[in-house]
Amino acid sequence: MANNSGNTVARSFLQVASTEEVAPSLRVVQIEGLVILKIIKHCKEFSPALVTGQLLGLDVGSVLEVTNCFPFPIREEDEEIEADGANYQLEMMRCLREVNVDNNTVGWYQSTLLGSFQTVELIETFMNYQENIRRCVCIIYDPSRSNQGVLALKALKLSDAFMELYRSNNFTGEKLRERNLSWVDIFEEIPIKVSNSALISAFMTELEADSPITQCDYDRLQLSTNPFMERNVEFLIECMDELSMEQQKFQFYYRNLSRQQAQQQAWLQKRRSENMARKAAGEDPLPEEDPSNPIFKPIPEPSRLDSFLITNQIANFCNQINGVSGQSFNRLYLMKALQDS
């Protein structure tokens, strides 16, 4: 009996060990308030230069906890310097481990200028992280947008459908229609929850001023939004020019494709007439397809990834312009009402 129970326990343990655990979907990114302050301080100190850093924490069920972070040094791109950067990250994580601080990598953060972060480099960084980290996020902070009185902080991840398509490196129209993937399905924004310990919350309560009005409230009342709006419109015009260039690539591709199809039809008609003549002469017909002929060589379709990213960026700029202009009208009407009264 003892042997049978031991075999049952061993068998059940092997079954559990061999069963792949299905992780729940990521629903929220929980960030400690100190981490947010570190990110804001690092990004604002070097603004308008773009900076990045490492996120450390724990992956617990459907919640990704970010408990610490550290910045990456700003250096020029070079192979030796990249190796030094990797050594710097390992050394930092080793030092954090020695002082019993969470040193599990859960992603990275980076600054952006007016929300212009949707690039191929961001996708490549995501894919590199995904090789070792099953679930990782990127925290995007925009100092220029935050100057308008709004905390421009968001957590992003790549959608599973897009990652599968990116691994196949086939962004043709047929594949996109087959997977029902559009430009809005590249990134997924994860809700952010700010968490503080009870001790920090009590300390912040003591530091809170008697007046309920803060500097952030005053920032929201600024009437001058022209510089922010002008930069957004400039970036929007640049994106429209880039999208026009991408459309020209596809127009050139479809013109070449229609020209090739016309040449194939002409060649096929000529070959069929030759076969009819050979058949009348009692000779064997020639094949109707000739792979060695250049006109039968397929023309590669341009990738639609760049156009998808540019469209995403255009939508982002339009949303920012819409939001800022709406807030500006509200402030102007408020000031007019105060003056009339």
Image: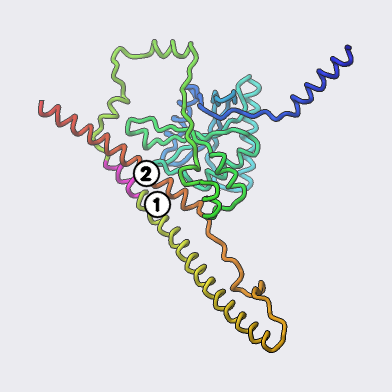
Q: Main secondary structure of the magenta part?
A: helix
Specify start and end residues of the magenta stretch as a single range. 226-234
Q: Is residue 306 above or below residue 130?
A: below
Image mark for residue 112: none
Give the crowd class for mark 1: few <14, some 14-19, many >=20 residues within 10 Å: many
Q: Does 107 appear in magenta? A: no
Nearest the camera: 208 or 163? 163
Residue at 81% across, 22% down: 11
Nearest the camera: 331 or 33? 331
Q: Where is residue 72, by image quadrant?
A: top right
Q: Where is residue 2, by image quadrant?
A: top right
Image mark for residue 317: 2
Q: Where is residue 150, by image quadrant?
A: top left
Residue at the extreme bottom? 281
Image mark for residue 239: 1
The type of residue carrying mark 1 is Cys
Judge left or right: residue 12 versus residue 59. right
- Locate residue 198, reporting x and y percent: 48, 11
Residue at 30% across, 12% down: 210
Q: Does 230 appear in magenta? A: yes
Callouts 1 and 2 close, C-beta under 8 Å: yes
Residue at 12% across, 29% down: 339
- Locate residue 266, reporting x and y percent: 55, 78
